[in-house]
Amino acid sequence: MMPDANVSMSQSSTHKRRRGSFRNRIAFYLLAIGSACGLGNIWRFPYVVGENGGGAFLLVYIFLSLTIGLSVLIAELIMGRTNEASLLKITRKVSVQNKKSFFWFGRLSLFISLVILAYYSVISGWVLHFLTQFLVGLFRSDRMHYLGNISMNVLNENGLLQFALASVHLLICGFIVLRGVTERFEKILTAVLPLFGILVFLILTRSLSLPSSPEVLRFLFYPDFSKLNLTSLGHAMGHVLFTLSLGMGVLVTFGSYFKEDEHLPTLGVRVTLVDTIISIVAVLMIFPIAFSISNKPLTDPSLLFEALPQLFLKIEYGEYFGLAFFLCLWVAALNASIALLETLISNLSDRFQQANRFSAAWLVILVTLFLTVFPAFSGTLFKNIKLLNQSLIENLDSVLINYLLPISVLGMIIIFFKSINEIDYKEKFVNESSESSQMLVKNWIWVLKWLAPFLIILGLILQFFSVIKNSFLK
Ligand code: PFF
């Protein structure tokens, strides 16, 4: 979620003082970490690791996160801070200066944000479904029996329910953003995130005490490189970019709100570390339960929702744990969705000075609501639309995260170097009091100029070969 949204979004960025700044450092860190940590870590990462064979993939992921993810994250923040504007406005400036059209980078990235917001709202709707089931369960006399029967099946068979839940989620985001209650929501978030941390820690200890955990630890920490295939690099790259909220302009907008004295690379390191640790913790929390289920759904997007309730049913006060867990997860998802919504509104208001915040917000919400129809009805109305043996929602996930996000990040890197001169970005990176930043600045630029483009393009090419191999060479 973006701070001081009311002030900053509508009045644009014509002067430094006009953009809002963060109230205090803790809230500021919580918000930055909050927008990175969400369903990507807890829901998506475990099944992506399962799909890609465990330990070796985890290593590739950690490597990419700490090199490319971290470098691009810092670049996006610095780009927002230096230009004091959102992405669309920056690409416009760069296009005018270079007499070339760089607009499409900005447009692509906002298009991706819009579709990801729709997709993210549908998954947040799933969380909302489990949350309400646990809540209803508490009031029933046959509580345990009722909770024992909750599963993804109800959702899979009911597209309308998925659409309705996603709409509720999106409208609540819109309400928070438009009614200017972001400050109140920030307070809730500040309370919920630490509680979520404690809950996850408790579930983790319980989960690791299951008899399956030695097998899980071997699967995760004894890398078997033969399990890597043509798609592994692209999948790891896509997930790193998604989970750190890169390539969507979110961190550019974020950066434009930061105070001058905040050292952005330090913030970037902390956000990346926390995000990576949370993802690993999520896998350690969910895999032991999944490994104890007879037909383990390791590679399935329903993994989190199939596995966790099984544990809640077994432990004392599990129904309360379940309720609290899904509530915290939903608040985290709400926060991440608000960050995306704010970015889209901010870009529209920044770019089109005449667009007022209210109409911009409604436009974004309505278009997003329309887009949610596709993932929501993927298993019902659109169940016959299959490509490469995958459903519409699986293809949407893959195209957005494994292909479009990396392309958008390539554009982001180009815009970064075009919009800021060398002296400026080096000055923003180097902290006088820290010797390490003086040493690292060269590595950071090297990763942005060479390593990131090379690995992103390699990942895309390898995935492309894999598609060709699977479609034609069978
Ligand atoms: N980083 C979020 C997650 O891992 O759940 C996903 C996300 C949220 C991406 C917000 C982009 C964003 F603006």
Image (cartoon, helix red, strand yellow):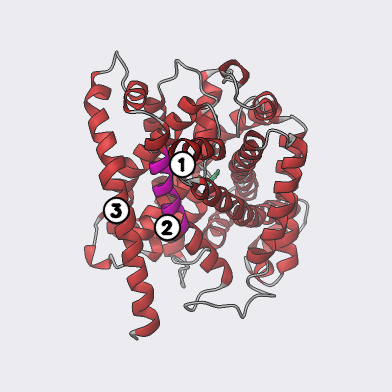
Mark 3 Cα shell of 10 Å, populated few (<14), some (14-19), many (≥20): some
User: Viewed as shown, does residue 299 lie left or right of 166?
Assistant: left
- Asked whether residue 77 is in view, the answer is yes
Instruction: Tell me the distance, in whole angstroms, between the alpha carbons under discs 1 and 3.
Output: 29 Å
Main secondary structure found in the magenta portion = helix
* Numbered label tally: 3
N-term mark: 2 or 1: 1
The quadrant in which residue 377 appears is bottom right
Give the quarter of the figure containing the N terminus. Answer: top right
Q: Which disc number belongs to residue 287?
A: 2
Mark found first going from the N terminus, 1 or 3: 1
- Asked if residue 355 is positioned above or below residue 439 in the image, the reply reads below
| Pointer 1 residue | 99
Q: Which residue is mark 3?
A: 455
What residue is rendered at 24% in x and 58% in y? 223
Task: For the C terminus, give its image quadrant.
Answer: bottom left
Q: Amino acid at mark 1?
A: Lys
The range drawn in magenta is: 404-415
Quadrant for residue 344, please give it.
top right
Q: Nearer the viewer, residue 321 or 316?
A: 321
Q: Nearer the viewer, mark 3 or mark 2?
A: 3
- Which numbered disc flags the more N-terminal residue, 3 or 2? 2
Image position, residue 277 (x, y; %): 39, 41
